[in-house]
Amino acid sequence: MARYNKIFAALDGALTQEAVVRRAFSIAHDNNAEVLFGHVIDSVPYEANGIDFAALTEDGLQRIEEVLAPYLARARADECIPSVDIQVRAGRIAETLLEALIEPYNPDLVICGVRGLSNIKYAFVGSVSTQLIRNAKCDVLVVRPETLEEHPQD
């Protein structure tokens, strides 16, 4: 079985986010691995408005810390998880995830959620999980929201 030392988990605020967090911490605990959570704020809607991306990403980081506070506290107290960090960037989602977050971190495993795009939207923009599977240089685990029901105590 593969041994994971560094796990990157992509957060998207969707229904699968909690499942991604739980799975990341479970695998990290079992492998004594560090975890980096990454979130990308889609810059496309803001590009023409001159928005302050630094302030936007700082606000995004604070919101993630608040939403995930119980999970983060438990994981940071877990002796089997050496470190837990969160980074937020603004940009085009798939490219920014790969180029600004995943590649510099050089993880052994990337975890992301499935969002279930409509066939039409998928045909035009594809999915982030598909792009990660095709382009990440490590294992990629795609978590479904049903996972929460299967593992309520993780």
Image (tube, helix red, strand yellow):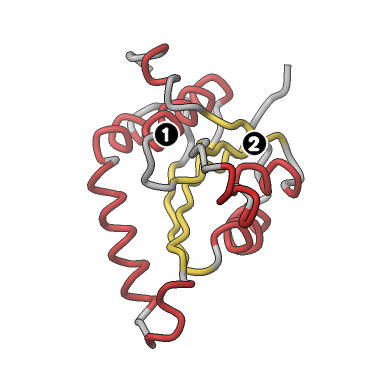
- What is the secondary structure assignment of the residue under circle 1? loop
The mark found on residue 105 in the picture is none
Q: Which x, y percent locates residue 25?
A: 45, 29
Kindly identify the amino acid type of the residue bearing the numbered disc 1.
Thr
* SS for callout 2: strand
Relative to 102, is 28 above or below?
above
Q: Amino acid at mark 2?
A: Leu
- Residue at 64% across / 56% down in the picture? 98
Which numbered mark, 1 or 2, is in the foreground of this view? 1
* Residue lying at 63% horizontally and 56% vertically, measured from the top left: 124
Q: Which residue is mark 2?
A: 109
* Residue at 73 percent of width and 40 percent of height: 138
| Quarter in which the C terminus is drawn | top left
For this rendering, which residue is in front, 39 or 146? Answer: 146
Other residues around mark 1 within 10 Å, as few (<14) / some (14–19) / many (≥20): many
Q: Which sits in the foreground, 66 or 130?
A: 130
Q: Earlier in the sequence, mark 1 or mark 2?
A: 1
Q: Nearer the viewer, residue 69 or 76?
A: 69
Relative to residue 99, is residue 14 drawn left or right?
A: left
Looking at this view, name the residue that lies furthest to the front. 120
Q: Are marks 1 and 2 in contact (CB under 8 Å)?
A: no
Query: Any mark on residue 16, and which?
Result: 1
Q: Residue at x 24, y 34 (%)?
A: 70
Q: Choose between 125 and 93: the one closer to the eye.
A: 125
Q: Is residue 19 left or right of residue 101?
A: left
Instruction: From the top left corner, tell me how far across and down residue 103 is, in percent.
Output: 68, 56
Q: Quadrant of the N terminus?
A: top right
Q: Is residue 126 above or below residue 84?
A: below
Placement of 76 over or under 40, stated as above or below? above
Q: Is residue 124 left or right of residue 63?
A: right
Q: Position of residue 11 (x, y in %)?
A: 44, 46
How far from the left and from the top, in percent, is residue 150? 42, 11
